[in-house]
Amino acid sequence: MLKPRFDVDKAHAVDRAKQERNIEMAKKLLKRNIDIDIILETTELSIEEIERIKKEMGL
C-alpha cells in the first residue's frame, strides 16, 4: 500500500531536519576538538560528511 503524498513529504521533512541537527551538532563538537569517533557515534554522520564539514569550517 502506498503512503499518501502528505505522509511522504512529512517523513522527508523530518529526516532533513534530523540531518541538519546532526550537522550543527557535529560543527559544535568539532569546534570543541572532540574526538572524531565520538562525533561519528553521536551524530550518525559518515566520516566523509564529517571531513566535508571540517573542510568547510577550515579545520
Image (tube, rainbow, N blue to C red):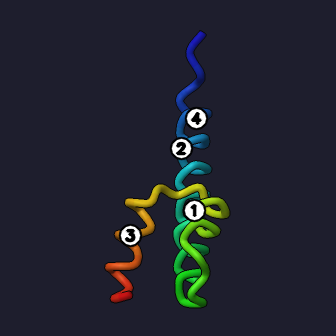
In this rendering, the label closer to the viewer, 2 or 4 = 2
Q: Residue furthest top?
A: 1
User: Which residue matches tag 4?
Assistant: 6
Q: Are marks 1 and 3 in contact (CB under 8 Å)?
A: no
In this rendering, the label closer to the viewer, 1 or 2 = 1
Of mark 1 and mark 3, the one earlier in the sequence is 1
Residue type, mark 4 in image: Phe
Secondary structure of residue under mark 4: helix
- How far apart in space, not on screen, are marks 3 and 2 (Cα)? 25 Å
Residue 10 on image: x %, y %: 60, 43
Residue type, mark 2 in image: His
Report the front residue among 33 and 25: 33
Q: Up-down: is 32 above or below 39?
A: below
User: Which residue matches tag 2?
Assistant: 12
Residue under the image location 60 percent in, 9 percent down: 1
Secondary structure of residue under mark 1: helix
